[in-house]
Image (cartoon, rainbow, N blue to C red):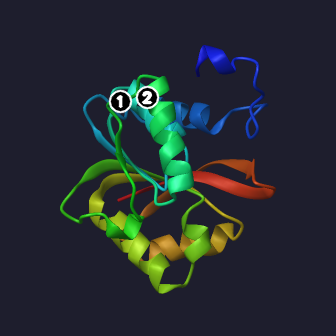
Amino acid sequence: LHPNFIDYPCMRENYGMTRLMTLCKYIYENSIELTGKKVLDAGSYLSYFAQNFSRMGANVTSVEFDSAKYEPACAINKMLRQDDVVMIENGIEELSPNNRYSITIMTAVLNWHLDSELGKKIINIINLVTEDYLIWESGYAIEREKQFILDNSSFKKYTRLQSTFGTGKLRELGVFSK
């Protein structure tokens, strides 16, 4: 996304429909307006989705607890002139339930905490702050994770978008809606 890195290969998505392309197609086909909408990127890693949703007109908050990811994300946002992305260095479970977001993005986060108290806290806060859609990418236990979300939240519908392959594991990208 920056000219200084034009020759760097993509380490995750270098063929077919990327996750971002798939999400953009879903957003377009479902007439989801992003301009002015509040979007939460929960467990944002280096803030990739936050940066792109911000470019599409959303008001984005990016949450990352790991300072080894948070600090580079802030630097990348600055380099890409994405200063309007609100960065929060915190755990997802520490978010205020008073804030509301139309869309939450949570990719490969919940799988680390399935069936734990932290996992239940995370999905509870995601459920409280998300008004419409949860964009989700699984970890390694795809069906178990989907069921965990459905059992512990008010998300009623799930739409599978595509299989993905990241960090050596087959994953799934999809959208939960209320």
On residue 107, which mark appears?
A: none
Quadrant placement of the C terminus: bottom left
Residue 130 seen in the current view: yes
**What's the amino acid at mark 1?**
Asp
- Look at the picture and state if 40 lies above or below 5: below
Identified at 48% across, 49% down, the residue is 70
Identified at 45% across, 60% down, the residue is 157
- Residue placed farthest to the left in the image? 98
Which residue is denoted by mark 2 in the rendering?
78
User: From the viewer's perspective, is 104 left or right of 35?
Assistant: right
Whether residues under marks 2 and 1 lie with C-beta atoms below 8 angstroms apart, the answer is: yes
Classify mark 2: helix, strand or loop. Answer: helix
| Numbered marks: total | 2
- Look at the picture and state if 153 lies above or below 12: below
Image quarter for residue 59? top left
User: From the viewer's perspective, is 99 left or right of 47?
Assistant: left
- Residue placed farthest to the top in the image? 3
Identified at 53% across, 41% down, the residue is 72
Classify mark 1: helix, strand or loop. Answer: loop
Residue 92 location (% of width, % of height) = 40, 64
Quadrant placement of the N terminus: top right
User: From the viewer's perspective, is 158 left or right of 129?
Assistant: right
Identified at 36% across, 35% down, the residue is 32
Residue 17 location (% of width, % of height) = 69, 32
- Mark 2 vs mark 1, CA separation in Å: 6 Å
Depth order, front residue of 161/94: 94
Which residue is denoted by mark 1 in the rendering?
83
Depth order, front residue of 50/124: 50
First in sequence, mark 2 or 1: give its number: 2
**What's the amino acid at mark 2?**
Lys
Residue 94 location (% of width, % of height) = 33, 68
